[in-house]
Structures are given as structure tokens and as C-alpha cells.
Amino acid sequence: MKPSIHDVIIDLLISYSTKENVPSVSEILSVENALPLVEEHLEPGTYHSYVEWVERNKERYL
């Protein structure tokens, strides 16, 4: 069975947020832009942890 676009996006979110190196600006913005597309497919706690991850990492570049 072919994975849905939501599954692919969620896999990317997991990949970006669990990597050991500091995420790039494009990775942070990719996660931020993808969140509205997958919000209904994530548990509320998981969704909010990604939002916090975005905010925390955006602060590095401000």
C-alpha cells in the first residue's frame, strides 16, 4: 500500500526533530509549514511538541 502524503510528512517531521545536528533554517521552516497539514493526524501532545521544537530552534537564528 502506498503511504499517504500525511505519512510522508510525519516521517520527515520525525527525521528532522530527532537528528543530532542543529537543524538548518530550511528544515525548521519545512516543519513549521508542514504542521498545519498534519495537525489532525497527530496526537495533540505530539503536535505541540513539534510547535515547541520549531519555536526553540527558530530562536537560534534570531
Image: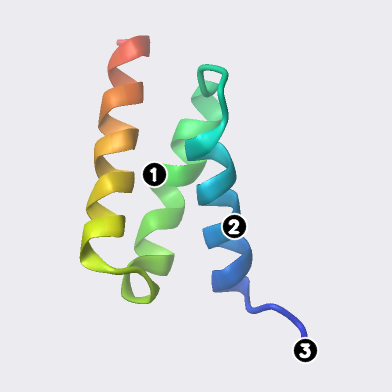
> Mark 1 highlights which residue?
32
> Mark 3 highlights which residue?
1
Q: Residues within 10 Å of mark 2 (few under 14, many from 20)?
A: few
The residues bearing labels 3 and 2 have C-alpha atoms spaced at a distance of 16 Å
The image quadrant where one finds the C terminus is top left
In the rendered structure, find residue 40 and report the number of the disc placed on it: none
Which label lies toward us, 3 or 1?
A: 3
Residue at 32 percent across and 35 percent down: it is 53
Give percent across and percent down for residue 2. Answer: 76, 83
Q: Quadrant of residue 55?
A: top left
Is 47 placed left or right of 10 in the picture?
A: left
Give percent across and percent down for residue 24. Answer: 55, 21
The mark nearer the N terminus, 3 or 2, is: 3
Secondary structure of the residue carrying tag 3 is loop
Residue at 56 percent across and 23 percent down: it is 20
Q: How is the image coloured?
A: rainbow
Residue at 42 percent across and 66 percent down: it is 37
The mark nearer the N terminus, 1 or 2, is: 2
> Mark 2 highlights which residue?
11
Q: Quadrant of residue 3?
A: bottom right
The residues bearing labels 3 and 1 have C-alpha atoms spaced at a distance of 28 Å
The image quadrant where one finds the N terminus is bottom right
> Residue lying furthest bottom in this view?
1
Is 11 placed left or right of 46 in the picture?
A: right
Residue at 54 percent across and 71 percent down: it is 6
In the depicted structure, whether residue 43 falls above or below residue 27: below
- Identity, as a three-letter code, of the amino acid under mark 2: Asp
In the depicted structure, whether residue 49 falls above or below residue 27: below
> Is 62 or 2 nearer to us in this picture?
2
Q: Are marks 3 and 1 in contact (CB under 8 Å)?
A: no
Q: Residues within 10 Å of mark 1 (few under 14, many from 20)?
A: some
